[in-house]
Amino acid sequence: MRTVFIVFWVFLVLAVNWVADVEVVAKLAVDHPFIEFVHKAIWPYIHRPYVF
Amino acid sequence: MIDFLTITLSATMMALLYNLILSAAGYLFCRIILGPGWTNRFVGGLSPLVIGLALGQAVMGSVWQVMAVFGLFQIGIVTFVLGGILLCFGIVFRTGIKWRANSGWLKRGFVRVPVYGWILLTGLVVVITATWIRSFGWPDGDAMAFYLAQPKLIAFTGALTPVADYESFAEIGLFAEMHSAVMYLFSGEMAARAWLWQSGMLLVLSMVALSVETMLPIGASILVSATVLTSTAILFVMTDGKTDHVGTAWAIASLLTALKIEWQSPWRPVFLAALLAGLAGLAKLSFLVGLPIILAILTIDRLFSTRRTHHINPLVVRVIAIACVAVAGVVVAWSSLMIKNYIVYGELFAPFYYLGGGSGHMLNQVWFSPENTRWILLTYPFALIYGKYPMQAGNLSPLLLAFVPMLILAWRQGFKPGRSSVTLAIAGLVSVCMWMLLRPSVLAPRYIFPMTLCVVPLLAGGADFWLSKSVSRFAVLLIVSAILVHTALIGLRFHQGWPLTQLYATNQKPDGLLVAGDHLGIDAYPGARFLVASYYKSFLESKVLACTISSKEKARLQQLNPASPAEMWACLYQNGVTDIMMYRPTHPRLLGQLPEVDETPDWLDVTEEIYSPIVSVFRIRSHDGTAPLIDGCDADCLKSIRFSNRVECVKQ
């Protein structure tokens, strides 16, 4: 169970980076509704772009 | 492609040769400070190499800076000094170098590399190659504005001549920038970029050495490398032309030295650690918040763990004595900056304290509103890893988060990390908390690299333990695959810029801004001055860079307040400004101040050359071809005079 958790956790933290990082998404030209959904769902909680 | 490889490989060899000479210098300095046999203090053979190069870079950066202040930064004198270093090295080590007693460390280390480590190394090679290529590409932002422009100007003038518009910013320690200036002196921008990339590799090696010195296995060293090489903040600065990572490598070298402090004879390592930390802190001022805390915690821990007495009084006395030695090391480190700022600016303690009034504007930064600052603080450490705020310039590696549960489980499975790796991690966390308290709204990993990197060895050690002991090889394969995908994505990100990189490295001017910069000053009168309305200047010809009007002169021009458009053009011309470059995205206001090109006096012609929708060059010429009446800028004269005489050379 612990092993499953660790694998899940590693994929989670890396996947958040892959999906949420708009540069990677844009440069890979990934245009999928699911990625779009995750991007919009996660990003605002971590990322507040260009606000002073 | 052949051109690209020829240029980049020769630049890389040039930078490598220079780094080897700096290593020789560092080796000599280490022998002087730590005494003969200093390499035997360390566990691995890598640490002396890392400390030697870091110290050579840091000290020689100071030496070049002082030489530039006195106008002695000339190719002949620099060659003489470098030759002198090699000669001294040859004399001192004429009987050969005993690298270290335990010379089989490297060989044994490779034998012990776990299978997953070999797989990860392939991914890291991809990232290293991609960043090497990208490091010859178009620099972004700050590097193009200051960090490459300033060394270029210093190399051209042979003196510490501040770049126009950044006169006060040049008060910072230019320890790393001086090495770029050496590369400009002997070769050009590509060699400077190669040197900066190699300094990034020095940072990776210093982190590996740190994990070795904290007694972690070789697998942990590979995970440490993976963490550093998947931190986009580090990759961006080492490929961009900035210098934050150079000071970071020196800071890590100081921590390596601090790990060798012992109760019986702490003085020499303390002095060297303080010297390195002082130079690292002055190379990147924000490090001064966390580095002293980390070093203090490490030193006290080392004294406690190696003490010969259990009485408190000797301990207190020793700590006070060590603090005095550390202060001496910092003062030596600071001396070069004090000389520079006293002679150039008349301010002995700039940029910290101004005897003539004023405040440390560079140190009191507030980037965000209170509301957004609160949000940033609440999202630490995620803000450092996933955040994408203005001026942040990259993140720390998500592997830091990935390793946390592995460390916890490894602990429960019997992982016994070395005392020093735990102390380092605690010191790193404390210093990050201190940063959050003192500079809550400044969110940029590059400002706190050494503090954040302190936690990496412990996390990597735990992850290596868990991966090595894991019952499921399939799970290990999945995790390693995920990390490989991550490194591939990072490699891909850097590869995206390949066409632009190739054009830039082979001097093919891929953008209107660069073309405009190339044309600025063509057919200009002897002694012409240039008004550059752009933050970015590194691509300008050296002569143009030297004759660009300063921010004070620009302010004075703005106060002239001419009565008509024709008078405005005449006013600019009579003040020696014959060429104006305007970059609209950053300086749109200038367009509102400049009259139309046909509203000129009878005796002047103004033409606008448009190089892209956002870049223009205005040329102001008199009908009869006569130059402005005032004495202008003599760039050739600037090359041969000292800084203090520059005012005489650039008359208004």
Image: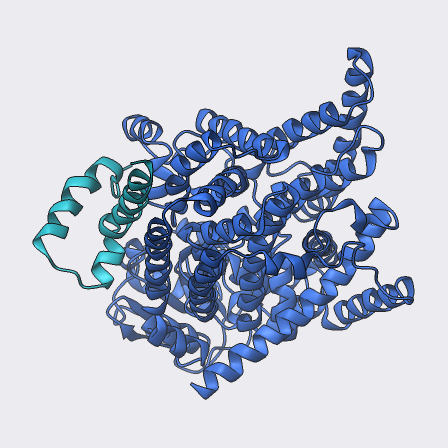
Chain colours: A cyan, B blue
Residue pictured at 46% horizontal, 88% vertical: B2
| Image x and y of residue B46, in percent | 68, 55
**Residue B143 visible from this viewpoint:** yes
| Image x and y of residue B374, in percent | 31, 26
Q: Is residue B476 above or below residue B82?
A: above
Q: Is residue A32 above or below residue B539?
A: above
| Image x and y of residue B24, in percent | 77, 62
| Image x and y of residue B520, in percent | 43, 74
A32 and B89: which one is in front? A32
**Residue B144 lies in quadrant:** bottom left
B385 and B156: which one is in front? B385
Residue pictured at 48% horizontal, 39% vertical: B462
The quadrant of the rendering that contains the N terminus of chain B is: bottom left
Task: Tell me: B628 left or right of B74.
Answer: left
The quadrant of the rendering that contains the C terminus of chain B is: bottom right
Q: Is residue B12 above or below residue B356?
A: below
Residue pictured at 69% horizontal, 44% vertical: B276
The count of marks equals 0
Q: Give the residue furthest to the left.
A: A33
B26 and B611: which one is in front? B26
